[in-house]
Image (spheres, rainbow, N blue to C red):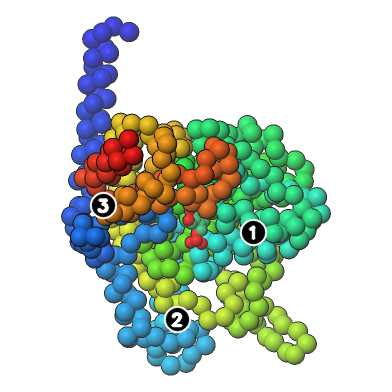
Amino acid sequence: MQAKYLDKIIVTFVLELNKELITSEMSIDIQKIRSDFPILAEKIYNKPLVYFDNAATTQKPQVVLDKLIEVYTKYNSNIHRGVHFMSNKATVETEEARNVVQKFINANQSCEIIFARGATEGINLIAQSFGEKYIFENDEIIVSEMEHHSNLVPWQMMAQKKKAKVIKWEFTDAGELELDTLKNLITSKTKIIAVNHVSNSLGTINPVKEIIEIAHQHNIKVLIDGAQAVQHIKTDVQDMDCDFYVFSGHKIYGPTGIGVVYGKEHLLEEMPPYQGGGEMIENVSFEETTFNKLPFKFEAGTPNYADTIALAAAIKYISEIGIDNIAAYESELLHYGEGKLKNIPGLKFIGTAKNKTSVISFNIDGLHSYDVGMILDKMGIAVRTGTHCTEPVMIHYGITGTVRASFAFYNTKEEIDKLYDGLLKVVEMFA
Ligand code: PLP
């Protein structure tokens, strides 16, 4: 290629890059956003908090805290079965929250949205109920090697109960799942594939749409664990065509104790209830019970309506900022962070997939992840250390754990600079 054309391409590329940076910086008003999260003003050991433990749980904006207070001070009342004003109000707000979630992940109908305690309970619900109906002796369940324990153990339990097998889909050393490997694992016995949308310990964004397409060619169902995805990237369950999708409220700026299970209506209709009790019934005599329609069939007992309503407030809040703006800004943080941290002597990244979001996992030669985390803590910097509930990932790399810095859209490049300075000090201390 002639040099003059090369120059032109480089100039255009730089202009495009600048345009992208300007766009994402302009669409995120970071000072305003930070002021929405009261906890970010806290001091830890008299130092400003740098919160990089967002993959474990996210902080809550004032609108979510206000919503919880609103529920408990204005219309707290058990839902669905009351005739009085407050019960009706709480019921309407809860069902409106279901519509908010439906719209957010683009489910076809609100009855396909089931509220559970979190992603963990959601996966247990699917494993138990789907497994009860469709998994039999010698059947196979493909689970990726990079799953959080909550998307592995429920399948192990189901497999044990039904004498089925859990098949490991290994990832590459970069932390990527390869589709050809999957194709070789599929057999006529495969019933379901369980895989995360984004890995919590590696940050990999998995090619879920392609995975689902391959699975469906073989009439295999797919459960996507979206616990680390919905808060970072656009989620469209119809476009993906997944059979099941789960996520946790507390990782998407909502309260703890609430999560979402999406399932295709015809599958949920065919599957048996997960738990028995109030709400999930249609009629009960001492001898037998008929079950309620969707989604209530899967929501036994008094639902966590207060946190459900506050989850909707969190989803509305991030939707106003725009998930695409969040994704662009967080991608900028990730690349800035990786660019900075690679200069720390002896630092090795764990998880170097091409397509990543918001997670930097690493180790430093000769240092234990706990020691690194504890010293950073004294500087007011919160990171997570250890296995991140993904022991098979650690076994893959032959390590005991990693240090994980995970970002949210309220983090800044200045905070990443503090992490960098902190790590340099850690390295100096142990030198
Ligand atoms: N799946 C992934 C990928 C996660 O990162 C987590 C939590 O870290 C979970 C599932 C479990 O979420 P919860 O503990 O909120 O149920």
CB of mark 2 near ligand 1 (< 8 Å): no
Image-based side of 126 in relation to 56, left or right: right
- The CA span between labels 1 and 3 is 38 Å
- Earlier residue among tags 1 and 2: 2
Q: Amino acid at mark 3?
A: Met
**Crowding near pointer 1: few (<14 within 10 Å), some, many (20+)?**
some
The location of residue 286, given as percent across then percent down, is 75, 90
Badge 3 element = loop
Residue 198 image point, x, y percent: 48, 46
**Which residue in the structure is indicated by mark 1?**
154
Residue type pointed to by label 2:
Thr
Q: For the residues carrying marks 1 and 3, which lies nearer the camera in this image? A: 3
Q: Residues within 10 Å of mark 2 (few under 14, many from 20)?
A: many
Task: Give the residue number, with chain letter if any, for mark 2.
Answer: 91
Q: Residue at x 25, y 30 (%)?
A: 16
The kind of secondary structure element at disc 2 is helix
Closer to the camera in the image, 170 or 142:
170
Earlier in the chain: of badge 1 and badge 3, it is 1
Please tell me whether residue 170 is drawn above or below residue 73 in the rendered image. Answer: above
Which residue in the protein does label 3 denote?
A: 379
> Toward which corner of the image does residue 270 lie, by quadrant?
bottom right
Q: Nearer the viewer, mark 1 or mark 2?
A: 1
Nearer the camera: disc 2 or disc 3: 3
Q: What amino acid does circle 1 point to?
A: Pro
Q: Residue most toward the bottom? A: 84
Q: Residue at x 68, y 55 (%)?
A: 156
Residue 92: percent from the left, percent from the top? Answer: 42, 79
